[in-house]
């Protein structure tokens, strides 16, 4: 944005986005309250009772369905895998990948994505994450010129004190941290004219936030002369449209700076911009008319050839699981299923009313029951004894109660079926048995269709995770201080854009130990004998899943001894042939010196006993070949490979 562009235009864009969002916040708040099974604490007791009576019986379907679907979509943080785009960066895969996975853990991306899934599934249908990097610095005096860049003569003069390098004061980094923070849907800003589902294609994205005065001084460059103007009450304290928490008793901090932050693609508003990946950051602070920050995004660097490196995606990452035509704010599963839940509540309320008004009532014949018995009946002691003369069938009885129509229970089942279709989380997928008849074939068909449907949403969550990782990688390449090989040192800042990022299939869903062992065993059976697999990590993983320490159990594979040589020895003289003996020694078949000494002692003992050690030479049989002949067979000794897949019925053979 050029300085001539009026800021009123941006204020109008932001206000339009806020209005579009605020119109839906009350619905999002209701979804959260109903999931918790509570009504806003700001209402008085009479108001809460009136609301509950107006709603009837509350059936909380949002709580179990939300927890089940979150677990199906994301139950563990996967390991990021890197594939180099250029062979120059192949050497950096291991070191940069290890550092990146460490940063993923330090930034607690797993917890952030679970928070976002609660927003998407239950509250608002949309969630956002801001990926950023914060650096702490201190003033230090450093040489104006790096001594290592001086010539040998200048370095010698420097050591002798003949010359001095002027010192300059710089901001030296002392600490750095990488953040992936959830943006509340009530703080998220989406352009009101954006209608797609690929939010990187939106002209801009923004968020509202708040920070302490110390943070504002450090991160926004505020000074004491504006402190009284900008230090305000947290805008969420109004409890209206600035938070999904409808409790206005929260957020009472009066010492915060409220701000609005926008990231936009420069080529939409700067005609001179030469890159489609260039971003601009603008920050408005409540109480000030002009933005306190208006600069190119610092997590980007431009190379001499004009290419941008670092973060080339919008640092605000958006997650949705559903697309509604021409609407960038899709409804959540809770919102879509709200009508069915209300219908289910009405059905349950009718059941309660039936039980309430069908309380057993007894009658008695006043002509047959005496005064004492009448008092006992009217008193209504629970399980009390009533004494009467003679049989009591005609003296005391129970008033017939109205029966509850059977179709009511059928309606209840139909409503729950509708909720299952909407949420795509059935009773089985939630970890319970379904009612009615079951068959293995039907269960298999349902499970396959469910996996196909939920797999689509799992893929969206995985891409959301990888988008966060890619932005983190851009920050890490620019600001990381991890060691690199000397050859890659000049390419450090390009590492964030040097790889494609991916994860293992279904890596975001946690499997049971037995399931993982079954998968690993199947992989070993299929590929272990191919010679292209390092099986030691797989074996170590299996032992770890079995509950044992791999370091105590797994050893390096021992080299297999050479196969024995099959020799045909016709006489003892063959053992005097050095070639034969060398062959036997290579396969450890030759007699050792100890064996020879033992044999000599045995022969001497047999001679003393008069045993004749000379064996007759067998006469050859005429017409019989010494070795079997295989005419027409090119490789008579060829044998098939051993079976890899072995059935249980074969006994593992």
Image (cartoon, rainbow, N blue to C red):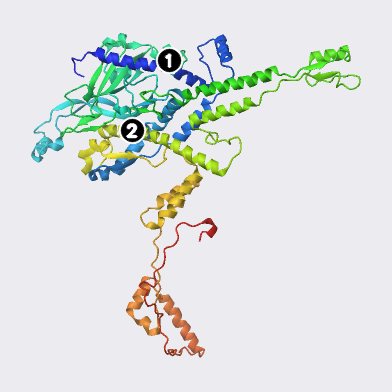
Tell which circle, 2 or 1, labels the residue nearer the N-terminal end: 1
Location of the N terminus by quadrant is: top left
Observer-nearest of 569 and 388: 388
What residue sits 39% from the left and 32% below the top? 109
Question: Quick check: 348 left or right of 33?
Answer: right
In this rendering, which labeled residue sits more in front, label 2 or label 1?
Answer: 2
Residue 584, above or below 143: below
Residue 42, above or below 555: above
Q: Which mark is residue 251?
A: 1
Question: Quick check: 601 left or right of 170?
Answer: right
Q: Residue furthest right?
A: 389
Expressed as whole percent of the image width and height from the top left, the position of residue 113 reads: 41, 30
What residue sits 85% from the left and 19% below the top? 386
Observer-nearest of 531 and 378: 378
Expressed as whole percent of the image width and height from the top left, the position of residue 82 reads: 31, 41
Expressed as whole percent of the image width and height from the top left, the position of residue 451 reads: 46, 39
What residue sits 64% from the left and 21% below the top? 351
Q: Which mark is residue 552?
A: none
* Residue bearing the label numbered 2: 467
Question: SS of the residue at dot 1?
Answer: loop
Mark 1 Cα-neighbour bin, 10 Å: few <14, some 14–19, many ≥20 = some
> In this figure, what is the number of numbered marks?
2
Residue 588, above or below 147: below
């Amino acid at each position: 944005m050029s300085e001539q562009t009026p800021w009123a235009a941006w204020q109008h864009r932001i206000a339009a986005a806020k209005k579009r969002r605020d119109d839906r916040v009350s619905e999002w708040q209701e979804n959260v309250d109903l999931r918790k099974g509570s009504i806003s604490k700001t209402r008085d007791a009479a108001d809460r009772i009136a609301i509950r009576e107006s709603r009837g019986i509350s059936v909380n379907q949002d709580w179990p369905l939300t927890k089940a679907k979150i677990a199906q979509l994301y139950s563990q943080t996967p390991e990021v895998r890197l594939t180099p785009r250029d062979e120059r960066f192949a050497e950096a895969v291991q070191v940069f990948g290890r550092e990146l996975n460490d940063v993923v853990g330090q930034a607690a991306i797993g917890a952030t994505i679970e928070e976002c899934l609660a927003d998407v599934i239950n509250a608002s249908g949309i969630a956002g994450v801001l990926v950023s990097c914060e650096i702490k610095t201190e003033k230090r005096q450093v040489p104006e010129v790096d001594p290592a860049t001086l010539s040998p003569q200048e370095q010698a003069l420097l050591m002798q004190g003949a010359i001095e390098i002027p010192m300059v004061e710089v901001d030296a980094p002392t600490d750095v941290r990488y953040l992936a923070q959830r943006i509340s849907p009530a703080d998220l800003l989406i352009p009101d004219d954006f209608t797609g589902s690929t939010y990187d294609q939106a002209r801009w994205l923004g968020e509202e936030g708040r920070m302490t005065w110390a943070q504002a001084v450090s991160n926004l460059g505020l000074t004491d002369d504006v402190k009284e103007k900008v230090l305000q009450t947290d805008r969420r304290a109004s409890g209206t449209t600035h938070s999904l928490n409808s409790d206005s008793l929260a957020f009472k901090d009066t010492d915060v700076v409220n701000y609005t932050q926008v990231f936009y693609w420069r080529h939409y508003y700067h005609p001179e911009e030469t890159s489609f990946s260039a971003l601009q950051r603008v920050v408005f602070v409540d109480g000030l008319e002009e933005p306190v920050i208006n600069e190119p995004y610092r997590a980007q660097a431009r190379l001499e050839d004009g290419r941008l490196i670092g973060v080339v995606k919008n640092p605000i990452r958006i997650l949705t699981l559903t697309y509604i035509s021409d609407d960038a704010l899709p409804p959540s599963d809770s919102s879509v299923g709200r009508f069915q839940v209300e219908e289910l509540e009405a059905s349950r309320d009718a059941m309660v009313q039936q039980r309430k008004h069908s309380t057993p009532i007894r009658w008695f014949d006043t002509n047959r029951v005496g005064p004492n018995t009448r008092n006992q009946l009217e008193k209504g002691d629970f399980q009390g004894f009533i004494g009467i003369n003679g049989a009591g069938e005609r003296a005391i009885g129970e008033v017939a109660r109205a029966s509850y129509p059977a179709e009511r229970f059928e309606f209840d089942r139909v409503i729950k079926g509708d909720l299952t279709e909407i949420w795509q989380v059935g009773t089985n997928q939630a970890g319970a048995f379904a009612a009615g008849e079951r068959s293995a074939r039907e269960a298999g068909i349902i499970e396959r269709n469910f996996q196909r449907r939920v797999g689509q949403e799992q893929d969206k969550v995985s891409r959301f995770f990888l988008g966060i990782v890619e932005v983190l990688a851009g920050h890490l390449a620019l600001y990381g201080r991890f060691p690199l090989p000397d050859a890659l040192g000049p390419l450090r800042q390009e590492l964030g854009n040097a790889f494609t990022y991916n994860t293992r299939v279904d890596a975001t869903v946690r499997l049971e130990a037995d399931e993982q062992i079954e998968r690993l065993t199947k992989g070993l059976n299929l590929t272990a004998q191919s010679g292209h697999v390092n099986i030691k990590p797989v074996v170590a993983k299996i032992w770890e899943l079995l509950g044992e320490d791999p370091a105590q159990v797994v050893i390096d594979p021992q080299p297999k001894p050479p196969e024995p040589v099959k020799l045909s020895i016709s006489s003892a003289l063959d053992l005097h042939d050095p070639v034969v003996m060398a062959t036997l020694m290579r396969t450890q078949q030759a007699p050792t010196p100890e064996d020879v000494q033992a044999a000599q002692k045995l022969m001497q003992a047999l001679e003393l006993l008069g045993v004749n050690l000379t064996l007759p030479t067998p006469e050859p049989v005429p017409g019989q070949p010494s070795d079997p002949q295989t005419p027409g067979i090119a490789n008579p000794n060829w044998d098939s490979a051993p079976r890899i897949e072995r059935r249980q019925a074969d006994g593992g053979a």
